[in-house]
Amino acid sequence: MVENIEAEIMALMQRYNPEGKPIGRTTEIGADLNIDSVAAMDLIMEIEDKFDIDIPMNQVGELRTIGDLIDLAAGVLQKT
């Protein structure tokens, strides 16, 4: 299940990676991809729609890497 979530999120991340940098679980969302807070919220909403989940906003601020995002989405999905 986590592998599927990881693949889907990695595919979504490509839209936020115009320079085509190699990305992985350790890629930092803000520092490496230059995703600002508005784009980050768009990304969160896309993930919520994709998996039909609600990601708690109080946990969004703690996200640093793509791996953090994958783990958070997987955890929320498992609780539903």
Image: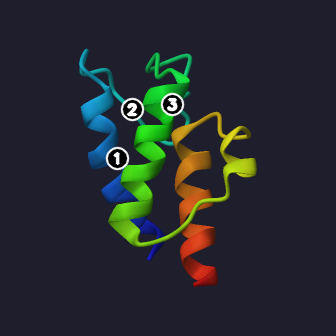
Residue that appears at 34% across and 39% down: 13
* In the image, residue 73 above or below residue 23: below
> Dot 2: what SS?
loop
Residue closer to the observer: 30 or 42: 42
Report the residue marked by disc 3: 27
Residue 1 picture quarter: bottom left
* In the image, residue 78 above or below residue 65: below
Q: CA distance from mark 2 to mark 1?
A: 8 Å
Residue 17 picture quarter: top left
Q: Is residue 14 left or right of residue 5?
A: left
| Badge 1 density bin: few <14, some 14–19, many ≥20, Cα 10 Å | some
* In the image, residue 73 above or below residue 60: below
Figure label count: 3
Residue 24, percent from left and from top: 44, 38
Q: Is residue 20 left or right of residue 57?
A: left
Q: Amino acid at mark 2?
A: Ile
Report the residue marked by disc 2: 23
Q: CA distance from mark 3 to mark 2?
A: 6 Å
Residue that appears at 49% across and 70% down: 53
Is label 2 in contact with label 1 (beta carbons under 8 Å)?
Answer: yes
Q: Is residue 41 left or right of residue 46?
A: right
Marks 3 and 1, the one that precedes in the sequence = 1
Task: Residue 10: give its label.
Answer: 1
Q: In the rendered view of the protein, which quadrant contains the C terminus?
A: bottom right
Q: Amino acid at mark 3?
A: Thr
Residue that appears at 58% across and 36% down: 65
Is label 3 in contact with label 2 (beta carbons under 8 Å)?
Answer: yes
Residue 25, percent from left and from top: 51, 42
Marks 2 and 1, the one that precedes in the sequence = 1
